[in-house]
Image: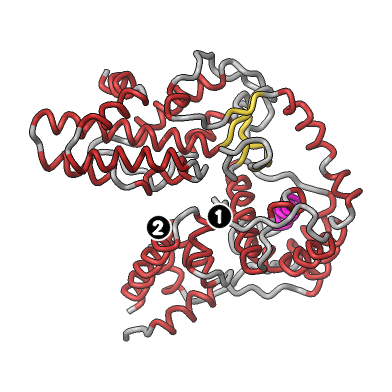
Amino acid sequence: MSESPDDIETRIRALGQVRQSAGARTATEALTRALEDPNVRGAVAGGRRRHLGGLLHRRRLIIGSVIALAGLGVGVPAVATSILARTGEFGDPSTSTEEDGTEWIDVGAEDAPQVVIDAYPEYLTLPPGMPKEAAIADVSRWFQKVAGGAGPGETVLQEGIITSTYEFFGMCAWTDVWLSARESGDTADQALATAWIADIENFRSFLSTDEPTSTERLKDVGAAAVAGEPKFVEETYVENDCAVRMERLKQ
Amino acid sequence: MTRAVAMVAPNEDVVGIEQFVRSIADEVLAYFVRRVTPHEDAADCLSETLLVIWRRRDALPTAVEERRAWTYGVARNVLAAHRRTGVRRLALAGRLRDELRLWPIAPDSGDDAAISALAKLSARDQELVALVAWEGLSVAEAGGVLGIRPETARARYSRARRKLRAHLS
C-alpha cells in the first residue's frame, strides 16, 4: 500500500506527540515564574558568575584569519583537571564582531580533547581514502598548540573555531588533491577537488562569522579552481600551512 | 548555528520576555522529553535553556516566530552539551524532575514502521524532519536551527520525505 504525503506527515507527527500531565505543567510554570525573579537568576548564576569572573582575565581566542588559524604559537598538552571544557556560555557579540553563537570551550579542561573529537562536522567530506581520523589528528594537534599549556579556567575559545579548523583541514586536503591532479593531468581528480573547493557551503562555520572579505576570498579561490588557475589555490595552500599538515599525514 | 536573526533593542520590555518564556516553556520541555533519557533530565535541560534565554535576552529576535526558532537553536546547543557532558542540575528544577520521574511524558507510539523509517534517515535529516513535524517550525527555520541555508534545508527536507515515503510504501 502506498502512502500519501499527508499520511506520512501524520504518522511522523504522531511519533512526537506528548501529553503533559497537569503536575508537569504546574511544575514547569513554577520553574518559569521562579526564573522571572532577577534575584533567583542571580543566585542560580552565582556559581557561574564566580566561575566566569576569572574569564575576564582569560584570553578569548577568536577567528582572525586563515593565517591566524595556522600561525598560533607552540604549546603543551592540556593539564588534567576535573573542570569540564563546556562552559555553557554561548557567543556574545559584544566581545567580538567575529564571534559566532557557539559555546565557549575551556581549552585547559580535562575533557577538552574529547570536545575536539566530537566537533568533527558531519558535513565535512574528505578526499576518497582519507579517513576522518586524519582530520581529527590534525585538528587535535592544532588544539594542543592553542591550549599552549593553559591551565583550567585560563583560556577559552569558541567551538565554532574548532569546526572552522576542520573545514580548513578539508581545504588543505582538497587543494592538495587539486594541485597534484593538475600537475599529473588527472582531470577526474581535479574536477572532484574543484567541486569541493568551489562549494562555500563546505565553509559554513567559518562564514557564519559574516566576514564579507572571507566570503569573497573563498569565492575567489573557488572561481580560480573552476578556471584551472593555480595562483589562488597555491596561495591558500601556503596560507593554511597545508604542505606541513599534509606531509605529517603522509609520514 | 542561529545567528541570522533580527536583533531587538537591549531595553526590550521585561514583561514581554516573561510572557514569551512562559508561552514557550511547555513546548521546549516537550522538545527535550522527545530527545533525552532519562526523561527527568528534560527538567535540567529546560532550566538551562530558560537561563540562557534570560542571559541572552538582548539577542532575542522581535518577531514571535523568529523567537521560537532562536529558542530552539539555544535548546539544540543545550541538548548537545547534555549529550556530551551533561548539564547542571538545579534545585529549582527538582519539582519538575520528580514530576517527570513519576509521570513520564515521553512519546509513546506503536507505529514501528514509521519509527523505523525515521531512524533510517541520517541524524541531521531526522532532526530536520522532527523540528518541522514535532516543533512546528518551517523548513527554513528548522534549517536555521541546524545551521543550514533555507534552500539547502528545503532540498534536504524533500529528499527526506521521499525516503520516508519509500520506506513506508
Question: Is residue A233 shown left or right of residue A211?
Answer: left
Q: Nearer the viewer, residue A74 or B32?
A: A74
Residue with the most extreme left position? A185
Report the number of numbered marks: 2
The chain letter under disc 2 is B
Q: Position of residue A85 (x, y in %)?
A: 63, 32
Magenta-colored span: B41-53
Vertical side of A134 occupied by B139: above or below: below
The residue pinned by badge 2 equals B122
> In the image, which is nearer the foreground, mark 1 or mark 2?
1
How far across and how far down the image is residue B23, in percent? 75, 69
Quarter of the image for the C terminus of chain B: give it. bottom left
Q: Residue at x 61, y 56 (%)?
A: B36
Please report whichever mark, 1 or 2, sits nearer to the chain's N-terminal start.
1
| Chain letter belonging to callout 1 | B
Marking on residue B4:
1
**Residue type, numbered disc 2:** Ser
Q: Position of residue A182 (x, y in %)?
A: 13, 32
Could you tell me which secondary element the residue under label 2 belongs to? loop
Pointer 2 local density, CA inside 10 Å: few below 14, some 14–19, many at least 20: few
Graded by Cα atoms within 10 Å as few (under 14), some (14 to 19) or many (20 or more), the crowding at tag 1 reads some
Dot 1: what SS?
loop
Residue A88 lies, with reference to residue B144, above or below; the image says above
- Residue extending farthest right: A39
Marker disc for residue B75 = none
| Residue B46 part of the magenta-drawn span | yes
The residue under the point 54% across, 17% down is A77
In the rendered image, residue A167 lying in the magenta stretch gets the answer no
Give the percent coordinates (x, y) of residue B84: 58, 42
The image quadrant of residue A152 is: top right
The image's colour scheme reads secondary structure
